[in-house]
Image (cartoon, rainbow, N blue to C red):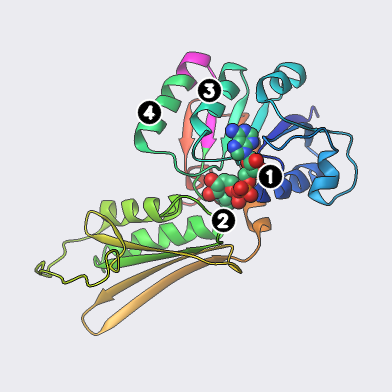
Amino acid sequence: MTKIRVAVNGAAGNMGREVLRGVNEDRDLELVAAVDLKGDGSDAGIQAGIGAIGISLERDLIPALTRTRPDVVIDFTSPHTIMDSIEKIMSAKARPVLGTTGITEADLDTIISWSKKYGVPAVIAPNFAIGAVLMMLFVAQAARYLPEAEIIELHHENKIDSPSGTAIKTAEMILKSRGTVNRQPMAELEKVKGARGGRIEDIHIHSVRLPGLVARHEVIFGSIGQTLTIRHDSSTRASFIPGIILAVREVMKLEGVVYGLENLLNLT
Ligand code: NAD
């Protein structure tokens, strides 16, 4: 069987190094390039803690894509530059598997238009941990009966965007599936600005950034005399790898853009 040729963008980062390890271990995948703004020509495997693999960490995406012609580029870089990277990847006819967060609805429309223009599919997932995807589905079910909820998301101290893409998507799923909220809105007195968190419509989202954390999402539903808490923890970044590898295999068979790992899982 022909192996899927994979490049990793953001290969020197926390996720990128984990992805390098995952791709390197998978028999159906062949790592062909490792790119990062911090690229210094050193062996990417040494950086990832798996020993030399003969692929150097390079700085510029376009020459790497032109030279190695990957089938798929896995991108875990930065919300600030992601759209620029995606256009480079798609115009090089490689399929993006995108984990970088901060993609807005307008960005998604642009990615869909690039997918049509360049004729390449893409997978975008704010959370590649299969447990987190299940959490969102359970939350959507619960919201049908318990429409009032708040979301708390907790991440490591270096996460720059808030709230997390998963928290945003979870709020959107609650809004889409929930029943009627009967509680009357009342005037609140917020003594410390932001104490009630951010809001998507009336759903409050609270973001915590602390060392020692990887990623946690917690949704608390409240109703008369009861609460229900649904929570998912990623305790190591390895939790994202099976979902990413699944997306790499699936993007080879897709047409168009798939947003959300749940759309690649046979859940019904
Ligand atoms: P990180 O800061 O550890 O790593 C990012 C790496 O990307 C750095 O090495 C940086 O030099 C590099 N980089 C930045 N801009 C670049 C560019 N334009 N071109 C090439 N390289 C570039 O961050 P991280 O913890 O690895 O997270 C990266 C992204 O992935 C964030 O947006 C984070 O929220 C997201 N993330 C998503 C999931 C998911 O399941 N979808 C899981 C974890 C993290």
Residue drawn at x 27%, y 75% as measured from the top left: 222
Out of 66 and 141, give the one closest to the viewer. 66
Q: Is residue 117 magenta?
A: yes
What type is the residue that disc 4 sits on?
Asp
In the image, taking residue 202 as reference, residue 24 lies left or right, namely: right
Residue marked by disc 1:
16
Distance between the alpha carbons at the discs numbered 3 and 2: 26 Å
Q: What number is the disc on residue 87?
A: 3
Q: Foreground mark, 3 or 2?
A: 2
Snapshot quadrant of residue 113 = top left
From this viewpoint, which residue is outermost toward the front?
192
User: What is the span of residues highlighted in magenta in the rendered image?
Assistant: 115-123
Disc 2: which residue: 158
Q: Secondary structure at mark 2?
A: loop
**Quick check: is the Cβ at mark 2 less than 8 Å away from ligand 1?**
yes
Q: Alpha carbon of mark 1 to alpha carbon of mark 2: how far?
A: 15 Å
In the rendered image, which residue does mark 4 sit on? 109
